[in-house]
Image (spheres, rainbow, N blue to C red):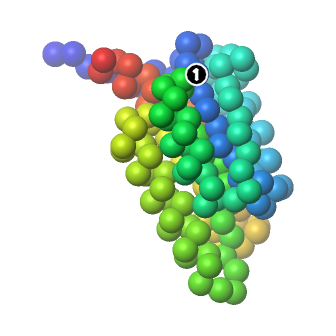
Amino acid sequence: MKEIVKNLNGTELRIGIVQSRFNTVICEGLLSSCMAKLAEQGVHQKNITLVSVPGALEIPLLLQHMAQSRKYDALIALGAVIRGDTYHFEIVANESARGVSEVQLHSGIPIANAILTTDTDQQAVERMQVKGAESALVAIEMANLLKGLA
């Protein structure tokens, strides 16, 4: 029996990151913890490409472009959608998540989705460090799993 085990070694991986500029403090916190974890797992800075976009709804289009380029082993989506007083929150949260999932499934490139959807700014602040780091680990693990299946 061939068993493909969890592998968090990122030394040979090429990672693309798409980061929203909306809710800047949260997104910078996500990026900081993501980059620290990527480095800790051996991903070389020269193998990371970072693109910023205006908001969460723009993330899937850039992910799609990056996935279609076939230059990346995995992609990471970083953003924050914080509930306001209007229905707009649901639209942005649902459509950005749907778009990320569609790109991943259609391209076959794993995407770690760290677009936070929270009720308050405080909830986002409390989650940004953990979710940023988790997104790095998810991207590395999924890229290595797919390589192990090849």
Would you identify the image quadrant in which residue 92 lies? bottom right
Q: Position of residue 133 (x, y in %)?
A: 65, 39
Side (left or right) of 115 relative to 110? right
Q: Is residue 52 above or below residue 150?
A: below
Q: Amino acid at mark 1?
A: Arg
Which residue carries the number 1 mark?
14
Q: Residue furthest bottom?
A: 85
Q: Residue furthest right?
A: 25
SS of the residue at dot 1? loop
Would you identify the image quadrant in which residue 42 lies? top right
Q: Position of residue 81 (x, y in %)?
A: 66, 66
Would you identify the image quadrant in which residue 35 lies? top right
> How many numbered badges does the structure rendering display?
1
Q: Nearer the viewer, residue 9 or 85?
A: 85
Q: Position of residue 128 (x, y in %)?
A: 71, 52
Side (left or right) of 34 relative to 142? right
Q: Nearer the viewer, residue 90 or 69?
A: 69
Q: Nearer the viewer, residue 108 or 126?
A: 108
- For image coordinates 68% across by 29% down, the residue present is 49
